[in-house]
Image (cartoon, rainbow, N blue to C red):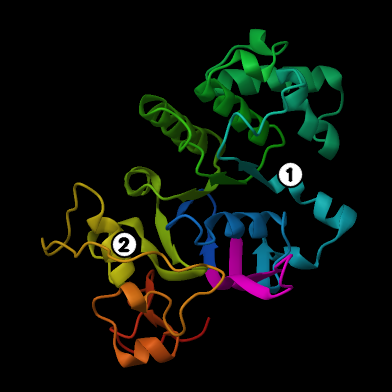
Amino acid sequence: MLELSDVGYSYISTNSKQVTPALEGITFSAKEREFISIVGPSGCGKTTVGKAILQLIRPTAGEVEFDGVELTRLRGAALRLRRGDFQIIFQDPYASLNPRMRIADILAEGMVALGTEPDGASMSRRADELLEHVGLTSGVKDRYPHEFSGGQRQRIAIARALAVRPRLIVCDEPTSALDVSVQAQILNLLKGLQREFGLSYLFITHNIAVVEYLAHDVAVMYLGRIVERGTAHEILGAPKHPYTQALLASVPRVETAWGTEFPQLEGELPSPANPPAGCHFHPRCPKATEVCRREYPQAVRLSATSEVNCVLYGNPATPR
């Protein structure tokens, strides 16, 4: 359903006019009804990947295909026709809902913009159904966002994303601003909605526990690049890249296929605007070699479903 091929994004600094890469060589795919998770530290480019898929920012390199249609080439009305297929749930439920709009208007906004319902009565019925699906009642439609808790606002944001009947939803850390008890409720809601509507999710997070609970496939990012990808079982059970191993070592409970503990990550995250030469992780990697300092490693195919960008493993993968 979704395929990213060597997607890159660079921005120009306002002050120095310097071109700075934020993403490089992002490649992965997603099937119908899959739950893909992108995990990595703050500032590594996870949200930028989500925005590039949705064409909220235009990639400066590579291709984004949805159902075989190359989205980066679409403009105006042609892109608008695809907007109903993919939506986003933002991180902060307090900032993502317009405080001046009633809930009914918030839910109707996308339906009006994309013309997914024939008339006002249909939009009203659709809003009632959506609110019930996310655990609220139709009686809240005339209220404003400030009258709800954070968890309730995020339920409304989820209903808004569902309003235009999308097939893919980008979830940009949708539980990180919520209390722990509410986080579990929202995650269970998303899981149930996936079964009910046949949704695909791209879930952006730094929380390994969320990945373990929900994800089918995982892509691990570090400073604008995917360093390892595979099934959740492969990544969590037998991680190969030293950064993935260090990431799992930071979790209080870690179980691995061989029962050994990984070293804790040391040093500071380099500036994304000025990443190290060679492998971006080499200044913090306990296994770094001289080769790591000189050039960025190519992808190495480990199985039919997993790859790692690290010189410690085999031969480069056959280009796809």
Note whether 208 is above or below 49 in the view shown.
Answer: above
Q: Give the secondary structure at mark 2.
A: helix
- Judging by the rendered image, the residue that carries numbered circle 2 is 235
Q: Nearer the viewer, residue 165 or 105?
A: 105
For image coordinates 73% across by 28% down, the residue present is 98
Q: Is residue 286 left or right of residue 60?
A: left
For image coordinates 55% across by 70% down, the residue present is 26
Counting every numbered tag in the picture gives 2
For image coordinates 32% across by 66% down, the residue present is 267
Q: Is residue 15 magenta?
A: yes
Q: Which numbered circle lies on residue 135?
A: none
Q: Amino acid at mark 2?
A: Ile
Range shown magenta: 1-27
Q: Which quadrant holds residue 110? A: top right
Q: Is residue 48 left or right of residue 319?
A: right
* Residue 150 rendering spot, x and y as whole percentages: 53, 24
Q: Give the secondary structure at mark 1.
A: helix
Q: Amino acid at mark 1?
A: Gly
Residue ranking furthest to the left: 259
Residue 204 visible in the current orientation: yes
Q: Is residue 57 magenta?
A: no
Circle 1 residues within 10 Å: few <14, some 14–19, many ≥20: many
- Judging by the rendered image, the residue that carries numbered circle 1 is 84
| Screen quadrant of the N terminus | bottom right
Residue ranking furthest to the front: 15
Q: Which quadrant holds residue 282? A: bottom left
Residue 1 visible in the current orientation: no
Circle 2 residues within 10 Å: few <14, some 14–19, many ≥20: many
* Residue 278 rendering spot, x and y as whole percentages: 44, 85
* Residue 249 rendering spot, x and y as whole percentages: 23, 57
